Image: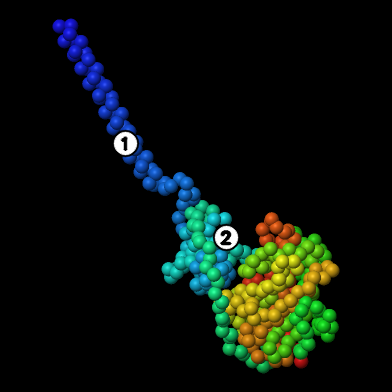
Amino acid sequence: MEGFLRQHGGFRTLLLLGLIAGIAIEGFLIYSKLNAQSLATQGDPTAGPSAGPLTCVVRSDVHLRTGPTVEYEILTTLSVGQRLEASARNGDTPWLRIRTESGQEGWSSTWSRGGVQLIECEGEIGELPEEQVESAPAATEVVFASPTPKRVLEPPSQIRVDNGPDLLVVQGLEVAIDGDLSEWGPATWAPIANVLYRSENWNGNEDLSGQVAATWNDDALIFAVRVTDDVLVQDAQDEEYYKGDSIEFFIDRDLEGDFDVAQYNGDDLQGVVTPGNFEDRSPAARVWTPATTNFANEMQLAAQRTEDGYAMEFSVPWARIGVVPQAGAYFGYAIALSDDDTPKPSPPEQETQMSTSTRLPYPTPPHWGNMILQP
């Protein structure tokens, strides 16, 4: 009898232990399933932010490219007001993967130019997932066609008022484009004196100021710019030249035809020239507008260091402006100086900007002054 009870008690113990083990196994399986579902929902915790696409809008014409640097091929130009969807970012750079309403995909930048952000998005860009892209392929030379020249026959019925000094462009001044301004004696100089961007960083005329003059012949419009700048810094590249010491130029070839149009169209031109740094960076140029016509390689330019800054000369072909020049013709124009006083390792930054215009010239042609070709 005692042996039977001992056996019976052992059996109940085994049964109880088995029941406990079964409950534990079932609980573990349920936990594992729930945990797997949770991980599937959350994604890889090492992958970083995974916010959904952001709705964005174009604030100023900008390129859509095949990759996230200016070395990549241009797919198209995104126009002001165009709505976009941003799905990824290229690390800490300003480049976003973009999808247009028509379904075209590529990369574009959220840079600011002249105080205007090229693309604005609703939501936090930093929460978009990162997408790493291989280095850009070797660039190929692109040859752009010139616009059909248009003859300017007479002055417009309307001209700009209170937009800064008129630029009187003397005809046929023989100058060598070498940065030496001693040949510009007969020219009329217009002051570049209006601080229009980040004025809190401007420390007086020795920090940044300048003058501009121009001459014309049958082939080109030639500018001379005398710049006072106590600290020369140019660490920016290509489309970002304006973030270093540089000169932006704006030309409206059809002043009367779109007098009140407050955004760029096909007859407006904007570009930038930089003197380099007079050490390991040579003078360079970039044409932004029209967006598909970077004819910088057709421009002549040169710069020289001066005691208080630098002097620069550069030419813009009439064929690219799109007119056959004639004395008495009026154009819209602006010249703007950008200044960066903080060298590497700080990133390039447009710390301030001065202009001939009394209002920020970018991206508004009605803010520009009058440029008049003299006989």
| Residue in view at x 83 percent, y 68 percent | 308
Q: Position of residue 201 (x, y in %)?
A: 75, 60
Compare residues 88 and 161 and report the one nearer the observer. Answer: 88
Q: Secondary structure at mark 2?
A: loop
Q: Classify 344 as above or below 308.
A: above
Q: Amino acid at mark 1?
A: Ile
Which numbered disc covers residue 30? 1
Q: Amino acid at mark 2?
A: Pro
**Quadrant showing the N terminus:** top left
Compare residues 249 and 334 and report the one nearer the observer. Answer: 249
**Quadrant showing the C terminus:** bottom right
Q: Residues within 10 Å of mark 1 (few under 14, many from 20)?
A: few
Q: Position of residue 40 (x, y in %)?
A: 38, 46
| Residue in view at x 84 percent, y 80 percent | 182
Looking at the rendered structure, the number of numbered marks drawn on it comes to 2
Which numbered disc covers residue 94? 2
Q: Is residue 39 left or right of residue 304?
A: left
| Residue in view at x 42 percent, y 48 percent | 43
Q: Residues within 10 Å of mark 2 (few under 14, many from 20)?
A: some
> Can the viewer see residue 211?
yes
Q: Secondary structure at mark 1?
A: helix
Q: Position of residue 194 (x, y in %)?
A: 76, 69
Q: Which comes before the other along the chain, label 2 or label 1? A: 1
Q: How far separated are the C-alphas under marks 2 and 1? A: 45 Å
> Can the viewer see residue 157?
no
Q: Position of residue 275 (x, y in %)?
A: 73, 71
| Residue in view at x 50 percent, y 57 percent | 132
Image quadrant in which you'd find residue 188? bottom right
Q: Classify 179 as above or below 174.
A: above
